[in-house]
Amino acid sequence: MSIIESSNLSKHYGGTKALDKLDLTLEAGEPIALVGPNGAGKTTFLSLVCGFIRSSGGAVSVLGHEPGSQALSGRLSALPQDARFDPTLSVGRQLKFYAQLQGLSSADATKEVARVLDVVRLPEVINDKSESLSHGMRKRVALGQALLGSPELILLDEPTAGIDPPNVKIIRDLIREQANNATFIISSHNLDELEKLCASVVYLEKGKLVHMGPIDASDDIDYLTIRMQAVDEHAFVEACMQLPGVVGVQRQTQGDFLIQCSEDDAVDQLLLAMLAERGWSYRHLARGRSLEERLYG
Amino acid sequence: MAALTIARLELFRLFGTKRGWIATIALLLIWSMVIRFVIYPAADLISSTETATFAGLILEWLGLAELSQWPSAEVSLYWMLSLYMLPFFCVVMAADQIASDKFRGTLRYITLRTSRTSVFFGRFLGQAFIQFLLVAITLASVIALVAWRAPDQLSEVLGSVPIVASNVFIVLLPYIALMSLVSVVAKSAIQAILFAIIAWILVLIVVAIVQSNFGPIEFLDWLLPGSQVSMLLKLSGWQTMQLAVIPLMQTGVLLTLGWFAMQRSDL
């Protein structure tokens, strides 16, 4: 079932094309990564889907309805990038208000608020004002807001931007836990994180769709990516180049080595044998290239 | 239904939060000063046998002789003061219907769950109810003053309460609607008030220019909220409802413009 369908979708801000005739169909299921450089149109696309802004041309339908339609209440939810809670009301009061707007009775809304705060592991903040919480906790409460009423489609715009690692891990775990109940579309610059969470990727650039496909790199069999533990770079590259089937070795920016190999040879096993022989330790070995390397390499 | 939920939250903001209570207390203190230092001594002056004739002459000279037709001096003074003062309270209290929520992004959380129409009219309804309470509280304070100073006039004063309350409330409606409209385009309550003042002055200037070039056009005299107040002061009793159509029409027009702006607005 398609959850979002856009055709010729455009959004202009003056002379700037934030989205340029975007044709896109996204299916329900595993989390979808929405990536692209700043100004690619990710937030604009999510804002159009949520009905926060109006398109300059083209059409988009969400779960079979127009964005902003009342029929989407409780079915679509989002964690908008810069949205903040009302500082005058407690977290619990606000979440209850949102739950009631989705059609829940007062008693059911109270239970639902307790449930989502449990899910985001922050039941103790129910009576706190959002301003008294840390940035990471606020993001978790905002994620709880997106889980109210168990929606079918959840859009997350930079859910972990500017957050400390412990909260990032909690948010990532939460998304993974909830991914069975809803389809997530996650916009982020953190490609490592998206690789861990998502099954497919949509890559936008200058408002246009550049690439769409599975995020899994297992079919990218011409490459191995390895992260070594304290090794002489030149010695390692030289040793790899001597292995049968290795076409080239490149040092990546994050300290990984990208080994290009021929399809016919079991280079991974030869590589492991070579590491054992030389007493070198590795921290991470993966088949294929990282998402970052595939998109921007 | 969603509009009522939104309206209820407006009441909670005023009576269920510290910020709301501070605003309410400040307002009540200002009103208590008005009662103590304006209505109470002025009512004395108007109703005292020694000064009543003089006060009557002054009112007649000001074209406000009809004020003496109200059942007590306190009600007359409340009628005059509320028509001029309560709109100021109303503009300040109703300034932040949409602005802060929109600027902060909170409105995004809300519009994911309900229509912009429900948000716009829900906030208006909430503010209208708050202003109704404001009228009720201020009028109750005047009734209490009458009960203390001239209990013999109390039954007649109570009889005039529906006329006064409904009239003052209707006068306030276009001010709430005006703030609904400007708060859609403003980023804060203060900016909304400034926009309202600018819009007010611009309309006055345009009306003056049009009328100086094309002669008096009666319809233009009724463009601004409160434009009927000077005529309202020359009426008393149920006659005052003759002019209710003006603020009601202003409210309708301002709400339509505000609703349209809300639909077109980027959140």
Image: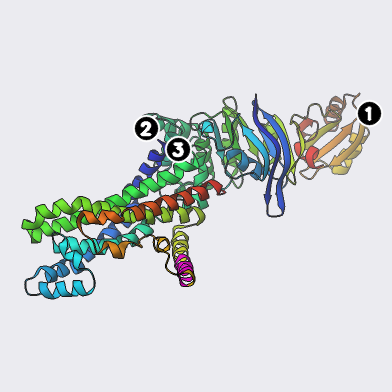
Percent of width and height locating residue A262:
91, 28
Do marks 2 and 3 both belong to one polypeptide chain?
yes
In which quadrant of the rendered image does the C terminus of chain A lie?
Answer: top right
Residue marked by disc 3: A98
- Check disc 3: other Cα within 10 Å, few if <14, some if 14-19, many if 20+: many
Please, what secondary structure does the residue beneath circle 3 have?
helix
Give the residue type that dot 1 points to.
Pro
Mark before the other along the chain sequence, 2 or 3 = 3
**Numbered label attached to residue A106:** 2
Spatial CA distance of label 3 from label 1 is 61 Å
Q: Nearer the viewer, mark 1 or mark 2?
A: 2
Q: Tell me, yes or no, whether the highlighted magenta stretch contains residue B207.
A: yes
In which quadrant of the rendered image does the N terminus of chain A lie?
Answer: top right
Residue marked by disc 1: A244
Please, what secondary structure does the residue beneath circle 1 have?
loop
User: Numbered disc 3: what chain?
Assistant: A
Res A296 → quadrant? top right
Quick one: A16 or B84, which is closer to the camera? B84
B238 to A277, vertically: above or below: below
**Numbered label attached to residue B103:** none
Percent of width and height locating residue B205:
47, 69
Magenta: main secondary structure equals: helix
